Image (tube, grey):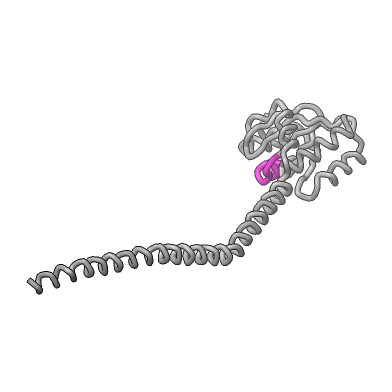
Amino acid sequence: MADTQARPDKAAAVAELTGGFRDSAAAVLTEYRGLTMAQLTTLRRSLGRETTYAVTKNTLAKIAARDAGITDLDELLTGPTAIAFVKGDPVEAAKGLRDFAKANPLLVVKGGVLDGRKLSAEDITKLADLESREVLLAKLAGAMQAKMAQAAATFNALPTQLARLAQALQEKKAAEGGADAPAADSGTDAAAADNGADAPAAEASAEA
């Protein structure tokens, strides 16, 4: 019964945890055994304002997870547990936890949930290895800027290209006109020759 329903004096804590699971893009479960309060404070600061790092009782966290519709975290809720509720970029939070754990091996990442899907500790490590949203956005902005610059250069080159095309067409037209002129002259000469040949014949006929 204790695992399925909180006592009245714990209801507020369960409600807060339930809200954390529901309102967060991700939740990462950790074990903090051996860490000092000063170290926990440092960890909270390193995770930033969009991530809340809360020490919690496992029984309350189990109830809150179930109330939020998450049913497969029970096996992770053992030992001293603190949950990082991530409302910002999950990749950034995963990187922060990974880096802190490297410097403070007593912090153990147990697993978590991302968009309703359960994550193992290995999954969170892979998540930490991804590029953050800020980096991806910066790369996207750079690619878009490069495309815009390329498009601008293309547009700027259009007048020159059109002028060259017009000049080439004019030269081609002039060349074709020059080739037709001799042909026309040849036709004229041929007609004159025919007229000359017909003249003697006409004279001979008149004399007869």
Q: Which range is magenta?
A: 15-26
Image point (15%, 68%), residue name: 201
Q: Report the quarter where the C terminus lies.
A: bottom left
70 above or below 48? above
The residue under the point 75% across, 34% down is 29
For the residue pair 89 and 185, the one nearer the viewer reads as 185
Main SS class of the magenta portion in the image: helix
Q: Position of residue 103 (x, y in %)?
A: 89, 34
Residue 11 location (% of width, % of height): 71, 42
Left or right: residue 200 versus residue 181 is left
Residue 57, percent across and down?
Answer: 78, 34
Q: Is residue 193 left or right of residue 137?
A: left
Magenta segment includes 19 = yes
Q: Inspect this view and state whether residue 32 appears.
A: yes
**Res. 117 image quadrant:** top right
Q: Considering depth in this image, is 93 or 160 the residue closer to the camera?
A: 160
Residue shown at the point (37%, 65%) measured from the top left? 182
- Residue lying furthest left: 208
Q: Is residue 18 magenta?
A: yes
- Which is more toward the observer, 139 or 188? 188
Q: Is residue 2 visible?
A: no
Q: Quadrant of the N terminus?
A: top right
Residue 63 in percent (x, y) is at 68, 35
